[in-house]
Amino acid sequence: MQNQSGLRPLGRAVLVQPYESLPELRSKVIEIPQSARERIALAEQEAIVVAVGPEAWQDEAQPRAKPGDRVMISKYAGIIVVGTKDKKQYRCVNANDIFLSIDADEAVIGGIVDNEKAA
């Protein structure tokens, strides 16, 4: 995965993009205020790694994730940032806030793996 955000994480930071696994939950009838959308985005735990800082996981035998990996991150971890080049929303989290890698062929819904939905 190529980092086209214009953002480069430093130190132990990891830049992730929220993974939108349930687009059918978005409603076109009810307008959600921007402040509420930001809180919802901070609560999202599935993400795709976009870029990794140079000091992330230096003390571990192997990195927990690499760009392009789908991962689970700590709820409310990090900060919301907007890419300077592509204007998309990202989260910048500490490397230790990534705790799980997700196989691409499985869908995670509320912590429950749903293999039928992924098929």
Image (cartoon, rainbow, N blue to C red):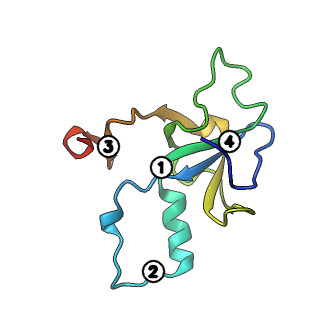
Residue 75: x, y in percent? 51, 50
Cα separation between marks 2 and 3: 25 Å
Seen in the picture, residue 112 relative to 64 is either above or below; the reply is: below
Residue at figure coordinates x 37%, y 53% from the top left: 21
Numbered disc in front, either 4 or 1:
4
Q: From the viewer's perspective, is 93 left or right of 99?
A: right
Q: Residue furthest left?
A: 116
| Residue, disc 3 | 107
Q: Which residue is mark 2?
A: 32
Rendered location of residue 87, percent (x, y): 66, 66
Closer to the N terminus: mark 1 or mark 2?
2
Say which label, 2 or 4, has the lower sequence index.
2
Residue 55 is labelled as none
Give the secondary structure at mark 4. Answer: strand
Precedes in sequence: disc 4 or disc 1: 1
Mark number displayed over residue 45 = 1
**Amino acid carrying mark 3 in the image:** Ala
* Position of residue 74 measured from the top left corner of the image (x, y, whole percent): 53, 45
Residue 48 percent coordinates (x, y): 53, 45
| First-in-chain label (3 vs 4) | 4
Q: Which residue is mark 4?
A: 51
Give the Cα distance between marks 3 and 4. Answer: 23 Å
Where disc 1 sits, the SS reads loop
- Residue 119 horizontal side relative to residue 88, left or right: left
Q: Nearer the viewer, mark 2 or mark 3?
A: 3
Question: Which element type, helix, strand or loop, lies under badge 3?
Answer: strand
CA distance separating discs 2 and 4: 29 Å
